[in-house]
Amino acid sequence: MAAIATRTLKDHAAADVAFAPNRIDSTGVALWVGPESIYDAQSSVTQLVKRASNGSAVNRVTGKVVIPIMDSVATTTKVGDLIASFEFVLPKVATENQRLDILAAAKAAIGDSVTLAAVQKIESAM
């Protein structure tokens, strides 16, 4: 099991943004927080690895990135959140190469032009 350590993600300008480890709660959800100094403005990343149990045939990896939207005038007032979530359902019988395949496909789908247009311009694929 990997240790909880600082995660570095990129912003829209490809600048590194460091997310510091904060805690792992009693359900196993790991939390990393961004560098923002105002609590309500703090970006976060969460991740949970849930191993197959009680007769389940699948492992699950879920995660979420949250970036708060702050008011442009009252800069300490949060007016919303940008949220990106993911879930990987990984059958116990899947090989490591198969798990790498789904990871590569998910990364490619997020980075392709259809997803870019949908998120950046709120355009449908139709």
Image (cartoon, grey):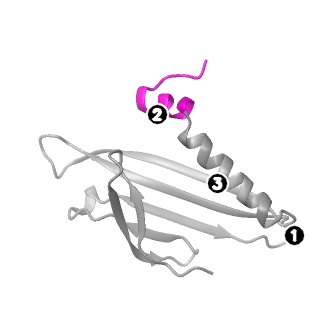
Quarter occupied by the C terminus: top right
SS at circle 1:
loop
Which one is closest to the eye, mark 3 or mark 1?
Answer: 3
Q: Residue 119 carries which label?
A: 2
Residue found at x 80% / y 73%: 53
Residue 35 percent location from the top left of the image: 28, 65
Residue bearing the label numbered 3 = 87
Indicate the amino acid at tag 1.
Gly
Q: Is residue 90 visible?
A: no
Mark 2–mark 3 Cα distance, whole angstroms, equals 18 Å
- Please provide the residue range marked out in magenta: 113-126
Number of residues whose C-alpha sits closer than 10 Å to that of mark 2, classed few (under 14), some (14–19) or many (20 or more): few
Residue found at x 58% / y 74%: 27
The question of residue 119 being in magenta is answered with yes
Magenta-drawn stretch, dominant element (helix, strand or loop): helix
Q: Is residue 20 visible?
A: yes
Indicate the amino acid at tag 3.
Glu
Q: In this view, does 116 lie to the left or right of 78?
A: right
Residue found at x 58% / y 75%: 28
